[in-house]
Amino acid sequence: MGKGAEGTRNAAASAASDREAGFEVDDDFRRFSQRDDIFCRSFWDPEVRTHRSDMFYETYRTPRMKWRSVDGFTRRDYALRNASWHVTDIFAELKEDADRREGFLDPYTVVRDGPGSALPVESPEEMAREVKHAARMLGADLVGITGYDERWMYTHAYSREGEVEKPQEIPADLDNVIVIAQSMDLDVLRTAPSALSGAATGATYSRDTIVLLAIAQYVTNLGYRAVASMNDSALVIPLAIKAGLGEYGRHGLLITREFGPRVRIGKVFTDMPLAHDSPVRFGVREVCDICRACTEGCPARAIDGGEPSRVVHNRSNIQGIRKWTTDAEKCFRFWANQNTDCSICVRVCPYNRDFRDWRNRFWRWLAGTGLRRLALWLDRASGRGKRLKPSRWWHAAT
């Protein structure tokens, strides 16, 4: 087959895969550089970096912390939030002298060498089953597998030290991506917005770090290359959707069947032969079409309330995709002003439920039918999604 025919075949396969995942990628699509991520911009871009944003980061270091008497922003709230980040911060700061912030700006490198020979894989399907089984044992709440897709890889990584772009490290010949999702604490997230609710985020990132490194070491021990990656290297939500972990929500987050939007995502790039999963659909797009809970709940007015579009609010948005797009500048400004991350959109999302309860599983089923408006009415009438006072969370301790 000639190169032209091969290119046509690949383009057709990619288009079919995009349709299955619900992606609408246009001809003017342009890949994204990590330097334009809103958190990276908060260090180098004067349009984002302010005294408030500097204070926001300082509060994650307890000696510099300035707590308040406001419920949810007291010394004990910040103490728990900062403790929750401790494990992932250790790895992020391990190689700062080498201009690396692993897990956030750079992939992890703390994996021991393998045996030098690879375990033969006779069946990619069976190997995928084994990898998922092992990943769950190692602590992954959800795990799926998809293929390497250059479109979602950052064109460049970002150097915090030089405030410039640097080369992307993930080799393109690592054909497969193991994607994991870790659930966040439901009750702590109910206190958003608060410093306390940030503990749910930090604790999940710390678990994510441990699980990703363990999976990468397991694959390496079998003789294959594996690179553990958290927030660095690629846009992870498209990969998670392709790996069958969930659907895209109006708030720009992954919504899973098991935990709704209450997850953090990581991935391991590998050359191990693995069968891929398929995207799933359980009614999220149809619910988000008529639900405005996140739009109405966002104090920054950063979440799109209209139809999916090609709008680009600023350089922190990717170009050439028709989707719901959040204004990252407005979102981060609210974070900086309150000195902690915000999870209000997660808290109010009707899929943010404990699906171990049969009543919540029934609600999910109802939301996936033509009675989804009734499901949304029931959600609002129930009061689910209302903020829990942080002091009440502390008083619930036994």
Image: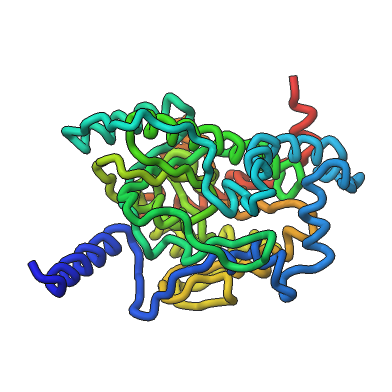
In front here: 32 or 95?
Answer: 95
In the image, is residue 362 above or below residue 50?
above
Across and down, in percent, residue 367 comes to 41, 49
Instruction: Tell me if 75 is positioned left or right of 233 in this view.
Output: right
In the image, is residue 377 above or below residue 272?
below
Instruction: Specify the quadrant that holds the C terminus.
Output: top right
Across and down, in percent, residue 43 comes to 72, 64
Residue 365 visible within the image: no
Across and down, in percent, residue 31 comes to 44, 70
In front here: 370 or 202?
Answer: 202
Instruction: Tell me if 251 is positioned left or right of 226 in this view.
Output: right
> Which residue is drawn at the image coordinates 82% and 63% (left, top)?
52
> Which residue is drawn at the image coordinates 65% and 35% (left, top)?
87
> Which residue is drawn at the image coordinates 51% and 38% (left, top)?
182
Q: Residue furthest right?
A: 69
> Which residue is drawn at the image coordinates 40% and 48% (left, top)?
246
In front here: 371 or 181?
Answer: 181
Q: Residue furthest front?
A: 116
Across and down, in percent, residue 170 comes to 43, 53
Residue 325 visible within the image: yes
